[in-house]
Image (tube, coloured by chain):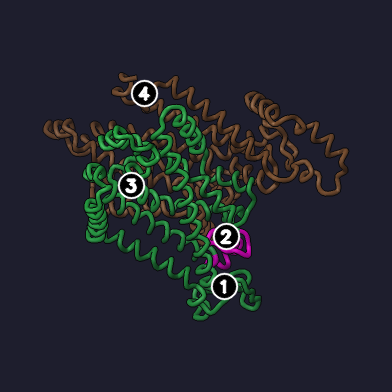
Amino acid sequence: MSNMKTAAPTSVNLASQIGEEDRFRDKLLRMARENKLAVISAVVILLFVLAAIFAPALTPYDPKEMDMMHRLSAPSAEHLLGTDEGGRDILTRMLYGARVSLLAGVLPTLMSMALGAALGLIAGFAGGLTDDIIMRIADIMLAFPSTLLAMIIMYTLGGGLVNVFLTLSLVGWAGIARVVRSETLKLRSSVYVTAARSIGVPRGRIILRHILPNCVPTLIVLFTLNVPSAILTESSLSFLGLGIQPPDTSWGQMINLGRQYLYNAPWCSFAPCIAIMLIVLAFNFLGDGLRDVLDPHLQNQ
Amino acid sequence: MKQSIPRRLFESLIVLIGVALLIFLMLRVVPGNPIETMMGEHANQATIDRMTAELGLDQPVYIQFIRYVTGALRGDFGTSYSLGKPVSALMKAAFGNTLKLSVFASLFAWIVGIVCGIISAVRKNGFADHLFMGFSLLGVSMPVFMTAMILQFFFGYYLHWLPISGSGDWRCFILPAIALGWNSAGAISRLTRSTLLDVLQEDYIETARAKGLTQSAVILLHALRNTMLPVVTMMAIQFSGMLSGAVITETVFSINGIGRLAVQGISGRDIPLLQGTVLFSTAVVILGNLVADCLYSVLDPRIRKEA
């Protein structure tokens, strides 16, 4: 981290920019060499993403078509993971549900990171009253238990795919703003920012060219660690029946629908449960691995 | 942690007021008139107007807010639309169950977490260490409803050892407590392990060993005291988190607690109930964080001196 900071003042210079990217790649390579778990996790995530994208090619069944002749049938050669209460193939629904569940992890996290990073940069750089106002709002958001906050925003917005994504974005930004702000405070007092200020570089330019690029490693780590929590919150909302509504499918919703048949058809709920657990574990391992090489001091937060 | 207690008190109060305002405003912008929802489609306009006036919903929003806050300070959270009873009475009845659940879950998390954490640190990289740390990772990655359903399926349905749901006698609370406490047990054991490993590097441990104390005496008499500092703080935060965040556990095990009331508030489009339960839960979290901060400065003489 410290050598990255000292490298930044010359980052306008093309040669050193290439050098910096090299170091970033070196760090990723080091992780790949030393941390097998992170590599396996990255592969698992990639497989999930591919499965979600190519869902129609991977399964002969339709995720929405009912087949009342084969309700709640146990796993078999025809239906590898069995069928649900509507006779729909569970594996098929999981592949299509992966689209919603993975998007619910990634899209809202990107949005909350954009919002959180922008507010954190402004708060940290401006200081004073602006800082106080932004950070007090963040404190208020962080005081809520996250499930309850998501529930109450869902209530206000109403159910459905887009509103779930909006809710998750609104729930996640405050924690990110807090980290980015403390990072900005550290960078603001660095020598090269003082130098840039003293030659009259405009504030917006200082933030975009000198502070933001130095926050990128932290943001990458935060991203990988926030995706699983967004996936878990989406599944909790859908599990409570507040999130994704039929005919859309997500893993959390499948678990909720399958819960009524827990004792005569446990596969309905347990298959999507295991999918959630795998993807969350994979993101956590990858996030830990990235943190170790990119931003070790984040550990304490 | 670096700030004095009065200042933290003041900040918590500001956050609490902000929370109340945010909840209040969010629930006011919900489309549709709550009275019309409550009375059904066939109510006539005169009745709706009368009810609206009776509940004070015809007043400007800021007056409604002031009324709500002053009422809440006296313990009056209004009347539930869907259940027809005062929200405070409903919450009082539900709080007992939530408290029981949280206490059982915390006891589980504390005992399991601390014991596993100590064993893992003492036998670092041994079999038990890998086993416990694996379990704690699973705990963090498994959604609560998954743990809950596995416990229900295995111990309730398959083995018939414990009741599957309800909030009757204490046996009903065992499975929910494990489901809810699992996550915290994992977090506590990881923290205990890493703190104890740090403490064992200190000079005074070296001294104690040099005096010829046995391993267990070194751990229990010298190292553990200093390990417990961050752990106790985390325990306070986790306990208040359980008091407020048991929505899913209570739903899966059909326990009539605060979390279930909040879900009822949503499904019944019952603003006073939802408002009351969320405000109460968030206040508990804020209080928990405050207590944790105070505990820290009381327990750690170094901070006490600075403050």
How many other residues sit within 10 Å of disc 3, few (<14), some (14-19) or many (≥20)?
some
**Mark 1 lies on residue:** A83
Q: Which residues are magenta?
A: A245-268
Horizontal and vertical percent position of residue A249:
57, 64
Dot 4 falls on a residue whose secondary structure is helix
Task: Name the kind of residue labelled 2 in the image.
Answer: Gln
**Mark 3 lies on residue:** A213
From the image, state whether disc 3 or disc 1 is nearer to you. Answer: 3
Disc 2 to disc 3, C-alpha distance: 39 Å
Residue B209 visible in rendering: yes
Q: Are marks 1 and 4 in contact (CB under 8 Å)?
A: no
Q: Which mark is residue B192?
A: none
From the image, state whether disc 4 or disc 3 is nearer to you. Answer: 3
Dot 2 falls on a residue whose secondary structure is helix
Dot 1 falls on a residue whose secondary structure is loop
Task: Name the kind of residue labelled 4 in the image.
Answer: Val
Horizontal and vertical percent position of residue A44:
37, 65
Task: Name the kind of residue labelled 3 in the image.
Answer: Pro
**Mark 4 lies on residue:** B298
Mark 4 — on which chain does it sit? Answer: B
- Chain letter, colour brown: B
Horizontal and vertical percent position of residue A171:
51, 45
Q: Are marks 3 and 1 in contact (CB under 8 Å)?
A: no
Say if B72 sits above or below A151 in the image. Answer: above
Q: How many numbered badges does the structure rendering display?
A: 4
Residue A267 among magenta residues: yes
Disc 1 to disc 4, C-alpha distance: 57 Å
Dot 3 falls on a residue whose secondary structure is helix
* Mark toward the start of the polypeptide (2 vs 3): 3
Which corner quadrant holds the C terminus of chain A?
top left
**Mark 2 lies on residue:** A253
